C-alpha cells in the first residue's frame, strides 16, 4: 500500500491518469471453464503461465519502443479451474491510452474477451482499486507464524490460500511492480529492518517513519547497496549485501 500510494502521488504530480487491464488466457488453456464448451487442449497449467509471461514481456518491449512511460502493479490470480490471469494497473499519460490499448490487444487477440482495458473514470482511487485484488490473493503471518488472509472477509480465506498454493507450485509471482527504479524495494526493506541509524541517515529515517516511499524513489540514485565479495561456508567467493551507503 505504501508503494501504491507513492506511485499514485507520482502520477498526480505528472498529470497522469491510470488504466486497469485484465489479461486472460484463450479457451484452449482452460481445463474446466465455468461458461461455454470445454475446448482445453491438455496444456498443463504451469505451461500456460509461459503464454502470459511471454506476451507481457512483448507488451513491455513495445511500450519502450513507443516511448510509453508507465508505472504500476501486476497481480496474478487463478480462476477456479486453476487457469491464471493477470490484473494490471498502469499509470500513464492520458494521450498514451489509445497506443496502450492497441499494443495490449495486439498480443492478446485469440478471442474478443482476452484483454479488457478500463480507463479511470474519476470515481475511484487507483490505490483502493488495486488493493482489492492484492487482498484477494495474498496472506499475512502473525507473530506466532499463523497464516491468514489479508481480506477481512473470512469466506475468501480458502480461495486466497488456494491461490497461494497454486502460484507456489507453478512458480508465479503474486505481485510485480512496474516502473520502480532497480534496487529501490531492496533499499526500502533494508531500512525497515534497521534498528539504528547513523546521523547522515536521518533524512532516510524520516522518510521511513512517514511511509514516504516516493521520497526514497527520488533519492534512489544517491543510496547505494554495498555488495563486497565474501567467502561463504562452502569456501566459495560470492557477492553478499552487507549494508547501505548514503552521502
Image (cartoon, rainbow, N blue to C red):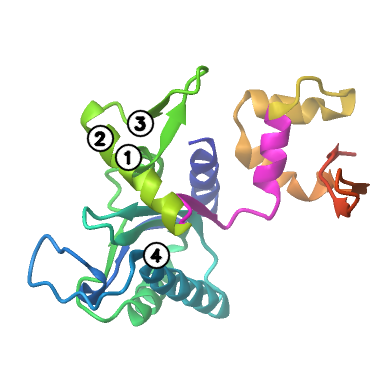
The residue labelled by disc 2 is 156
Residue at the disc numbered 1? 160
Q: Are marks 2 and 4 in contact (CB under 8 Å)?
A: no
Residue extent of the magenta highlight: 172-192
Q: Is residue 91 above or below residue 164?
A: below
Residue at image location 48% in from the left, 21% down from the top: 142
Q: Residue at x 35, y 31 (%)?
A: 149
Which quadrant holds the C terminus?
Answer: top right
Q: CA distance from mark 2 to mark 4?
A: 24 Å
Q: Are marks 3 and 2 in contact (CB under 8 Å)?
A: yes
Mark 1 vs 3, N-terminal side: 3
Cα distance in 3D space between marks 1 and 3: 6 Å
State whether residue 118 is above or below residue 109.
Answer: above
Q: Which element carries disc 3, helix, strand or loop?
A: strand
Q: Are marks 3 and 4 in contact (CB under 8 Å)?
A: no
**Which residue of the protein is positioned furthest toward the front in this rendering?**
234
Coordinates of residue 93 in the picture (x, y in percent): 47, 63
Badge 3 local density, few (<14 within 10 Å), some, or many (20+)? many
Q: x, y percentage for residue 24?
A: 29, 66
Q: Earlier in the sequence, mark 3 or mark 4?
A: 4
User: Where, by quadrant of the figure, is residue 37 drawn?
Assistant: bottom left
CB under 8 Å between discs 2 and 1: yes
Q: Are discs 1 and 3 less than 8 Å apart at CB?
A: yes
> CA–CA distance between discs 3 and 2?
7 Å
Residue wearing tag 3: 149
Residue 7 coordinates in the image, percent (x, y):
53, 47
- The residue singled out by tag 4 in the image is 46
Mark 1 or mark 4, whichever is nearer to me: 4
Decide: few, some or many residues near mark 4? Use Cα within 10 Å; few <14, some 14-19, many ≥20: some
Amino acid at each position: 500500500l505504501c508503494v501504491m500510494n507513492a506511485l499514485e502521488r507520482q502520477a498526480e504530480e505528472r498529470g497522469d491518469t491510470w488504466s486497469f487491464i485484465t489479461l486472460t488466457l484463450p479457451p484452449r488453456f482452460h481445463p474446466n471453464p465455468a461458461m461455454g464448451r470445454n475446448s482445453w487442449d491438455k496444456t498443463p497449467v504451469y505451461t500456460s503461465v509461459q503464454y502470459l509471461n511471454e506476451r507481457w514481456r512483448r507488451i513491455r518491449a513495445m511500450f519502450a519502443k513507443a516511448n510509453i512511460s508507465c508505472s504500476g502493479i501486476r497481480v496474478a490470480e487463478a480462476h477456479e479451474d486453476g487457469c491464471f490471469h493477470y490484473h494490471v494497473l498502469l499509470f500513464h499519460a492520458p494521450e498514451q491510452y489509445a497506443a496502450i490499448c492497441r499494443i495490449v490487444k495486439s498480443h492478446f487477440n485469440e478471442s474478443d474477451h482476452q484483454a479488457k482495458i478500463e480507463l479511470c473514470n474519476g470515481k475511484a482511487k487507483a490505490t483502493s482499486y488495486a488493493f482489492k485484488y492484492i487482498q484477494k490473493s495474498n496472506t499475512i503471518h502473525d507473530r506466532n507464524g499463523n497464516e491468514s488472509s489479508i481480506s477481512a472477509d473470512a469466506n475468501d480465506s480458502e480461495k486466497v490460500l488456494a491461490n497461494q498454493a497454486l502460484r507456489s507450485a507453478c512458480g508465479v509471482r503474486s505481485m510485480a511492480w512496474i516502473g520502480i527504479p532497480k534496487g529501490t524495494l531492496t533499499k526500502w526493506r533494508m531500512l525497515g529492518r534497521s534498528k539504528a541509524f547513523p546521523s547522515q541517515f536521518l533524512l532516510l529515517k524520516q522518510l521511513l517513519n512517514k511511509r514516504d516511499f516516493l521520497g526514497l524513489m527520488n533519492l534512489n540514485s544517491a543510496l547505494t547497496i554495498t555488495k563486497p565479495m565474501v567467502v561463504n561456508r562452502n569456501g566459495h567467493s560470492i557477492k553478499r549485501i552487507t549494508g547501505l551507503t548514503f552521502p
